[in-house]
Amino acid sequence: MSLKKISMQKTVLILLIVITIIAFYSFDFAHYLSFSYLKENQLQFNDYFQDHPFLVSISFFVIYIISVAFSIPGATLLTLIGGAVFGFIWGLIVISFASSIGATLAFLVSRFLLRDSIQNRFGSHLERLNKGIEKEGAFYLFTLRLVPIFPFFLVNLVMGLTPLKTGTYYWVSQLGMLAGTAVYVNAGTQLAQLESASGILSLPIIISFTLLGLFPFIAKKIISILQANQVYKGIKKPKVFDRNIVVIGAGAAGLVTSYIAAAVKAKVTLIEKHKMGGDCLNTGCVPSKALIRSAKFKSHLERAKEFGFEETQANFDFKEIMQRVKRVISQVEPHDSIERYTSLGVECLQGEATITSPFSVEVNGRSLTTKNIVIATGARPFVPPLEGIEEVGYLTSDNLWDLPVLPKRFLILGGGPIGCELAQSFARLGSQVILVERNARIMKREDPEVSDIVQSRFLQDGIDLRLQHQAQKFAIIDGHKTLICSNDQGEAISIVFDELLIALGRKANVSGFGLENLDIPLSKQGTIEVNEYLQTKYPNIYACGDVAGPYQFTHTAAHQAWYASVNSLFRGFKAFKADYSVIPWATFTDPEVARVGLNELEADEQNIAYEMSRFDIDDLDRAIADEEAHGFIKVLTVPGKDKILGVTIVGEHAGDLIAEYVLAMRHGIGINKILSTIHIYPTLAEANKYVAGQWKQAHKPEKIISWLEKFHQWRRS
């Protein structure tokens, strides 16, 4: 259906509602729904019903539905009339169905007129509410319906804005309103004894309904406790525990979990089978950034003329570059060492952990009893099951750092962050890099213009970009390692290479430590399935970091670790839902790409309205002085407001510049406040102020400025 037709239908419906309400008050229908009129004419109503039972029932049914559907005041009095005229049984049947149908129509009217605009405007803020309604909407609606002190017309309007299914809304309303309807219908049968409509809900009745409304929450809590106990059925629970927490995995998530537990004086044991620090320290963030720095330094030497130098040379040995990478790891290593964490109060054990029950973990032949278990086993590089891949051999981010010689022809599969960072670094160090990506562009989660800028720089760096190429198989042909792939035309392409790097994402480590013995379910993504509190099937077993998802960033793992640690230690007193509302990340290519919140691609996909403010960094004084005048800052805001929805930065030190926006979004600071904040001149951070200035320019008060122009003209005369 076209937008124009929908708009016309909405206009007609609004006019119909307005006309109905105007008619209601213009013809003083409110008088006929007054308590005094009802009491005065009760006998006439009864007599007419006796003479025309079917006509009265149908007419009353239709009037009641229209009244509720259009949220016209008077449903309470109509219910009393129904009780007085029809009696309790027939009155309850007629009114119960009429009120539920009318409520559902009001729900649909609200949904048709308002939901799209509300969801578009506040979609990011309503995301958690929508998920909660999708999961437990019937439960929440039922509790609201049980308590008549909540205006039912308001419930209809508000619930219409949510994703609750219409059928569910009807039957829950039918059931939930039954008790309240019965009270009013019964009061109608006793109309002669009533002094006023407000007298129906006495304090004892209100308290009774409130308790009735609380009952589902109490019942839900009891059920959750019973369900929690049910999963432990047949499992022997120790009377006394050796430890408060056993943490499996000493990566970012495990280290932070242990740190927090030790800080609040809990007894915590951290088990790691390989190296402390996990992937980030040993094979991920730290070594890759060290390599990127060396490669970038070499690229600066090659740009010597831009900085006023006639000629420079960079003689290097690739082995020394890799030795520097390992030196950097060794310098950072003490931060994550057994010695440091032992000094903090964490018991650190080297060995393979096996979860033998929800309350015990075995390591090195010892069985440790524990109140809680936190799984932080991380992830590993995903390797596709392609024919011939084992024959040609491959590298991943795990073993790349042992590479003894710079590859001459270096094939990289994957155009995501890891593949892009390493492709550019090796190209700058002298490898002939061929990057194969099945999509039409690299970094597909970013806006297309971001991909274009990075791709342009890649081409300058000599990277052979093979976009829309799908890997089929590997083979050794005439003694050469070869990839057979197909391009977007379906043609078979052969690519010869010396070394292969697989950079196609990461797969959660969910096996080898007893998880399968407890039948703990996994998500569709292959991560451990956890609830909003990071609990698994067993309430005392938590998972955080890459093994839990949904994000695979070191800083997100640390963020989740706080929830896992606090929730496990203080479960029963207070629990916190993991908050993913403001998650930043960066890809450390040159130029860097950093982002927090929505970009235009996501906003358009989610149909979220936004305004875009942009500042091109090539106009920034410090960037010009540094010969880094490229890139941009793009800020998305709520239309007509300065509330930030998301920020994308492309340029030098983008990963550092994004921090100001992360703070702003986390604490509800608008872009206008960034504009009024002093930034040091000349710095790259000034770009944040300038993009705020662009927003201000687009929202300047034209009428006031026009008036001020006249005012100053008058002052000059």
Image: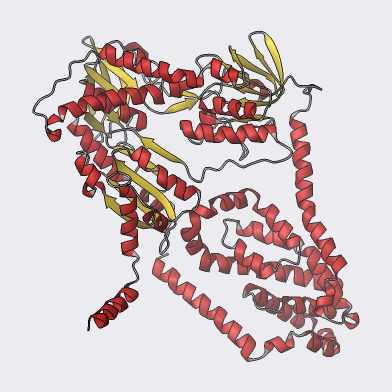
- Of residues 251 and 435, the one nearer the viewer is 251
Q: Is 255 rendered above or below residue 115?
A: above
Image quarter of the C terminus: bottom left
Q: Residue furthest front?
A: 716
* Residue found farthest to the right: 193
Determine the residue positioned at 30% across, 33% down: 589
Residue 321 is situated, as x and y percent measured from the top left of the image, at 28, 16
Left-right relation of 298 to 666: left
Q: How is the image coloured?
A: secondary structure
Residue 578 in which image quadrant: top right
Near-viewer residue (656 or 600): 656
Of residues 476 and 629, the one drawn nearer to the viewer in this rendering: 629
Would you say residue 458 is visible in this rendering?
yes
Q: Quadrant of residue 103?
A: bottom right
Q: Is residue 469 above or below residue 352?
A: below
Q: Is residue 136 above or below residue 7?
A: above
Location of the N terminus (image quadrant): bottom left
Tag count in the figure?
0
The residue most toward the left is 310
In the image, residue 201 lies at what x, y percent?
83, 71
Image-based side of 552 in relation to 167, left or right:
left
- Look at the image and tell me whether residue 552 can be seen: no
- Tell whether 283 sits left or right of 55: left
The residue drawn where x is 10% and y is 25% is 311
| Occupied quadrant, residue 71 | bottom right
Q: Position of residue 247 (x, y in %)?
A: 61, 23
Above or below residue 587? Residue 279 is above
* Relative horizontal placement of residue 44, taking residue 676 as reference (left or right): right
Residue 601 coordinates in the image, percent (x, y): 37, 48
